[in-house]
Amino acid sequence: MGNLFKIAIRNLLRYKRRTLLTASLITVGVVFVLAFVSISGSFKNMMIGQITDSMLGHLQVHRKGFVASIETLPLNLNLKDGAIGRLEKILDAQPEIEAYSPRVKFGGMFSNFTETSSIRLTAIVPEREFKTVPLLPGRVTEGSKDLKPGGILIPELLARGMKVKPGDAAVIVATNADGSVNGKQFIVTGVMESATGPGGRDGYVHMDDARELLRMEGRQVSEYAVRLKDFGKLAAFGEKLDGLLARESNQQGKPIFELHIWEKLSPFFNIARMIDVMTFFIKLMLIAIVLISIMNVMIMAVYERIREIGTIAAIGTLPGKILNMFVIEGFCMGVVGALIGDLVGIGLVYILNALELTYNFGQQQGLILQVGVSPADVLMISATVIVVSVIASLQPAFKASRMEPIQALRHT
């Protein structure tokens, strides 16, 4: 086998220009795929981080049926005292959980005493909420990030449209679970940008104010947002927690809780999935580049060396060794192209990070592009290139190994 490698490398060096061009083409393909995978993966991770860490949390637990009716923010589907205690007992026992936060969601009317507009409100316990979604305070663009009883954080769209600023008084009118209407005066604590785009109309109030405004008896919670210590274990932990919650049932034997990871709650998951699809097709393009370039070189190598093939076959070289010789040539070109491409691609990633390029995402301005290259991606792309190089060499190699020595020697 060592001799075959020596012969294959010698043959590649005999046609330096062709070998260099083919290896360069493979290298360019590997570099661009690595760069695209790194940049798109970094953007995807940033986008997911912005959504989960500023609004949703990694996963949420609701009463069964709440999410299906979430557009109406139904207060009658809130979790009550008994269910809350059972759920918190389960959550407290999970070592994977870093923090979790109770929320009450409801709709209401926001009035500055001259104009009135609709608003969606989330009642929170600030200390717990800021641990669960740590980027939430960063969304406050004006005023104080500290939400205390009597204060309200309002969306930027509402503040701009109704000319409301921090320190102004406002009234929230909401319909209670029994259908009665109640109102409460608040002081605008801060103005916050929306995590879902310029049309967002979501505000925040303290949990104590929500209980008073909605006249809630006992503890009530619309949802629990949960943050994990390791986001990479989300899928596995989601299955585990879903199994634990499925054991909890009401007096009728029906499930009490339903669990949704962030993917089921945000339309941005479709963008993340599109990034994965684009990455897959980019990888297919790399495979096509390698396949066509290697096959073209090997076909030309077989055609130009017919007499040589006939000679080594005539002196007793077995067809299997001839086949291996050409396959090794393709393998060597794949290895060289992949290695150089990996080195250049990783270098390009470091250069991009050093340049500190900025971009905007939704309402987030001036985000710095942090490109990361995963060892798994490097290994996968390199292995793909090498395997495809070998596959592309098989047909020309098989043709060479099946040549009749006499006919090959007569070839001119």
Image (cartoon, grey):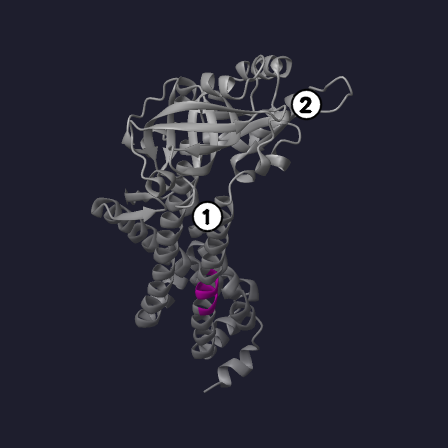
Task: Answer whether residue 288 is magenta in the image.
Answer: yes
Amino acid, disc 2: Ile
Task: Answer whether residue 10 is magenta in the image.
Answer: no
Disc 1/disc 2 C-alpha distance (Å): 43 Å
Image: magenta residue range: 287-292
Residue occupying the point 66% across, 31% down? 65
What secondary structure is the magenta-colored segment mainly? helix
Residue 239 sits above or below residue 353 on the image? above
Percent from the top left, x then y, of residue 141? 29, 35
Residue farthest right in this picture: 252
Percent from the top left, x then y, of residue 100? 48, 21
- Report the side of 375 relative to 291 (left or right): left
Q: Provide the residue designation for mark 2.
A: 256
Residue 169 sits above or below residue 361 on the image? above
Residue occupying the point 47% across, 49% down? 271
Amino acid, disc 1: Met
Label placed on residue 380: 1
- Report the side of 111 relative to 146 (left or right): right
Percent from the top left, x then y, of residue 159? 34, 38
Secondary structure of residue under mark 1? helix
